[in-house]
Amino acid sequence: MKSLHLLLSVASLAVALRLDRRGKVVYDGYKIFRVTPGESVADFEAQLESLEAIDLTHNHGHVEEEHFDIAVPPENLSAFEGLNLTSEVLTDDLGADIALEGELAEYPGSELSAAALPSLSWFNAYHAYDDHLTFLKDIQSSFSSNSELITAGKSFEGRAIQGIHLWGSGGKDSKPAVYFNGNVHAREWISSKVVEYLTYQLVANYNNDTTVKSFLDKYDFYILPIVNPDGFLYTQTTNRLWRKNRQTRSGTSAIGTDVNRNWPYKWDGEGSSTSPGSETYRGVAAGDTPENTGIRTLGDQLANGNGIKLYIDWHSYGQYILTPYGYSCSAVVSNQAKQNSLAKNTASAIAKPYGTRFTTGPTCATLYATAGGSNDYVTDVNKAEYGWAIELRDTGRNGFTLPANQILPTGIEIWEGMKYLFANM
């Protein structure tokens, strides 16, 4: 299926994207379809070649569930429907779904004092990139004796990759690490919000909940909510569906590299692309994105210190808890049975508040191949005990454009899962 993925990615470059008066890409009238490719992928490729469809995601971990989610521009809807492919409509109007996310809300900062915990209202809306930085500073200020702001290098455009380090009674840098990355893929806005919600709960409850206190007393948490700041900002100013970083390269007009196909481990393989126009472009050389260099260097330092107990790379969408490996569907991590048990029980805990169901299993066998992916590197190179990727809400109805009223419920259910995981891993 890799060839189809490349086809759709390259085709997306040819779409005559419409812009509004502010220069933002307009997706009004685009429909999102979940398409079953059928027996002949080659025929499917040939049929879709001229549709200028935007590749959103695909699942070919299980043949019986194999599908592709694609956004078709309004001018090509008749042609798509004429192909008589097996498909279902996930979204009638992508532009309308983007509108349901709401306008970026203003964040005034802590309203009480410099040391006050920010309001939970932060999770009622999406916010501008600079407000995320302010929110992180406010969280740190409210927990100043047990936290510090950290950076993990800089982005291609020179923005610091900002994060926070939390610790408990053992003191700074005294325990094994829990390491979280959010928003490596720019359009996955819910991922940074959930990472911030987990940070909020750890800080807010450390002094009044013995269970939460035990988490921070046992582990040092290193949390980077937005590791692709350039791409994230671009989704807010120009193109809501942008995925990669904003790195330019000589010899091509295509922009961007998939930072999560750029890790220097099993880099040259299925699930990544050599085409600069592809959504999964792996780069010219392993580890040659500044974002990857930054987050990888921090991970290497943690591994060489007290070790990494748990790493999670947070994504959307699909509702999956994915264990290693992504580079191979047959490779098995040494503690796979334990990982399977933890993942399934974490999924059960996530389901308790709202019944949201997560699928669990190794990345390649469960979802798709991801050569050069984060959790494989952190598992085999950094020797993390658990290296996961989690795909958050939903299963496709809203996809990357999750309405703002689902931010808080998503955080609440994931916090339930993490409380189980932290207590049992």
Image (cartoon, helix red, strand yellow):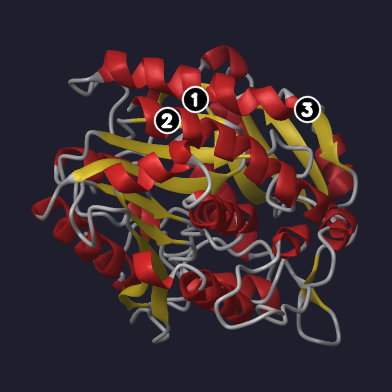
Residue 208 location in percent, x, y? 53, 48
Q: Amino acid at mark 3?
A: Ser
Which circle, 3 or 2, is nearer the viewer? Answer: 2
For mark 3, what is the residue?
87
Q: Is residue 372 visible?
A: no
Across and down, in percent, residue 43 comes to 61, 30
Q: What crowding class fits label 3: few (fewer than 14 Cα within 10 Å), some (14-19), or many (20 or more)? A: some
Determine the image quadrant of residue 157: bottom left
- Vertical arrangement, residue 293 with respect to residue 409, above or below: below
Q: Amino acid at mark 1?
A: Thr
Q: Secondary structure at mark 2?
A: helix
Distance between the alpha carbons at the discs numbered 3 and 2:
37 Å
Q: Quadrant of the C terminus?
A: top left
Residue at the spot 49% in from the left edge and 38% down from the top edge: 390
Left or right for 240, reference 197 = right
Does the rendering let one see residue 362? Answer: yes
Pick the residue in front: 116 or 194.
Answer: 116
Foreground pick, 133 / 255: 133
Q: Which residue is mark 1?
A: 346
Q: In the image as oriented, which residue stretches furthest toward the left?
A: 304
In the rendered structure, which disc, 1 or 2, sits on the residue that comes first in sequence? 1
Where does the image place residue 192, in percent across and percent down from the top left? Answer: 56, 58
Q: Which residue is mark 2?
A: 421
The part of the image, by quadrant, that contains residue 274 is bottom left
Please report the residue visible at 23 percent of the width from the left and 53 percent of the height from the top.
Answer: 170
Q: Given the image, on which type of amino acid does mark 2 rest?
A: Leu
